[in-house]
Amino acid sequence: MRMDSEKIRRIDETKIEIPIDYKRGMRVRGIIYVDETLQKDLEDQSIDQVANVATLPGIVESSMAMPDVHTGYGFAIGGVAAFDLKDGIVSPGGVGYDINCGVRLLKSNLLREDVLTKMKDLVSILYNEIPSGVGSKGRVRLGPDDEKKILLKGARWAVEQGFGDASDLEKIESGGCIDGADPSLISKKAYERGRAQQGTLGSGNHFLEVQYIDEIYDEKAANSLGFFPGQVTVMIHTGSRGFGHQVCTDFLEVMEKAAGKYKIELSDKELACAPFSSPEARDYLASMRAAANYAWANRQCIMHWTREAFFKVFSISPKKLGMELIYDVAHNIAKIEEHEVNGRKMKLIVHRKGATRAFPPGHPELPEIYRPLGQPVLIPGDMGRASYVLLGTEKAMKETFGSTCHGAGRIMSRHQAIKKAKGRAIWREMEDKGIIVRSAGRETLAEEMSEAYKDVSNVVEVVHKAGISKKVARLRPIGVIKG
Amino acid sequence: MEKFKILDISGDVGLTAFGKSKNEVFINAAIGMYSLITGLDAVATTQTIDVSVESHSPDGLLVSWLNELIFHFDAYGFIGKKIDIKEFSEKQISATVAGEEFDAGRHEGKLLIKAATYHKLRIEKMNDSWEIDVIFDI
């Protein structure tokens, strides 16, 4: 055990405190939402990263991390940090490389029994319809003007092209299009990388899953969302692909120079940042928003092809199939939001890196249909266990700038996982559990096996107990497409 | 001398590259990275690309070098196998990379590497050799 880890204090059952004297230069304390079980998996380096973020200028209240925290670049993954617009900073490292990596969930009118005999067909059609894996190209061919339109319009662009319905848009965070994107700031390289990747799933931990609802925790909320036991759902997890990565790469360089120019001391190069009011920060945010819109269009296209695949396999009318969007959340993003700090309403720039917005009932940014309920929060787990639907709460608004966890979080390196899977047929193990998987990469399944992740149920239990979101339903996978 | 080995970290993937000179260790880091994307035995050297990068720091030069090669793969599918560095100074690298376009029918898709990072980056001169640690976002 390290010397300074003695300074870490448990606040209550669900959170620990990294005191302000843990590290020189901390302006606020750090808070990590973990119970005693998850604390055992907590890496020293993640704690250090939460403390490093607390040293950045203009940070408000505390540097936070969610229970799925693990070591990232600069900022820990699972981190939430809000900065004052006057003295605070903006950092690409607080958003992550995959800008607007996020999750969307669709429901259907089908029951698990209706689909089980057709799962192999369904999974192989989905796999063929939705490009995934290394070197895959999208089905949408884009000219430079099309790409600019995507950056300005997000999911709305996809709907205009006939991918999905206008009614989908209100069920997407920020309506699937965040204002203030500026395509003129985007590098030629980002455009080149983005050209062939719109409408692709990608690789790594990105996936498309066919699932069913196996447990309902809040009957009233589940009814309002149109959920019932055994109901088939589809979850899509992907982001802004090479486009967003290039934007992040481009701006890390800009921000490193900016940090020097504005004399911001950095304990880690990946924390590179600039004052909110600087032209560098303004340009980054306008570019980040463009990438966020690229990601919303991407998930919209993929959802459209998912619906088409279902129509093909089940040959019933769209209306009967009832494949409606439940919600779409971003879990790598920075947004200007209004929050109450010391009894005063303030505009802040909230960085969520591997954390999900979890706004409470009545919040003005929620669409009318969800205003009485609170914002749906979508938490994907690993491919063998479960995923969750939660709702945002008032307590999240008070404690975590309206934020909660985003997933399971790895415990095993990819290399370890591959070693552990040697000689095993992961696809067959999954099939024995009733889950049909298809993957483009041979090693992807080994890297992504359940054992490589924390149990998402433990993560969700912490945020539920802490009251920063509340459980509505658990979803079990029956079909998985991986990159 | 071993050219590179995989560095074990949770979440993403890294490499330690070795070389007798700084020139060689930069090449081996790039070859190591390519071999994480696909098996290089199946890659032919039928095309070449010229790349040139600049940076104001040694760490920045390495990150820009690898990110430039990632860009050519991610945007155009170009996968390299042989690298010839033409010019190498403190702040600039120019090189010719020989390889071919990735073809999912012939080439195995391993990891989709999306960026080289500064996380735990190390460029070190040992007694009579060089070493690099670099971690990739995937």
Image (cartoon, coloured by chain):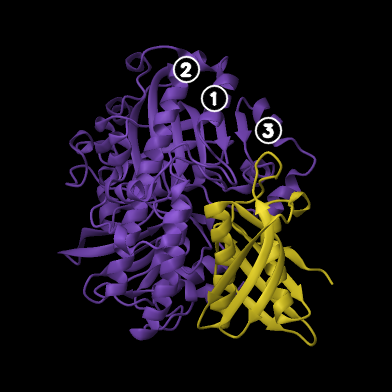
Chain colours: A purple, B yellow
Q: Is residue B114 above or below residue A342?
A: above
Residue under pointer 2: A312
Are the residues at dot 2 and dot 1 in contact (C-beta closer than 8 Å)? yes
Q: Residue at x 34, y 68 (%)?
A: A62
Callouts 1 and 3 on one subunit: yes
Q: Please identify the quarter of the rendering in which residue A433 is found.
A: top right
The label number, if any, that marks residue A427 in the structure image: 3
Chain under label 2?
Answer: A
* Residue farthest along the top direction in this orientation: A316
Where residue B28 sits in the image (x, y, percent)?
72, 69
* Residue at numbered disc 1: A125
Q: Quadrant of the N terminus of chain B?
A: bottom right
A333 shown above or below A282: above
**Closer to us: A208 or A366:** A208
Q: Residue furthest left?
A: A344
Residue at the image point whose x is 56% and y is 32% from the top: A480
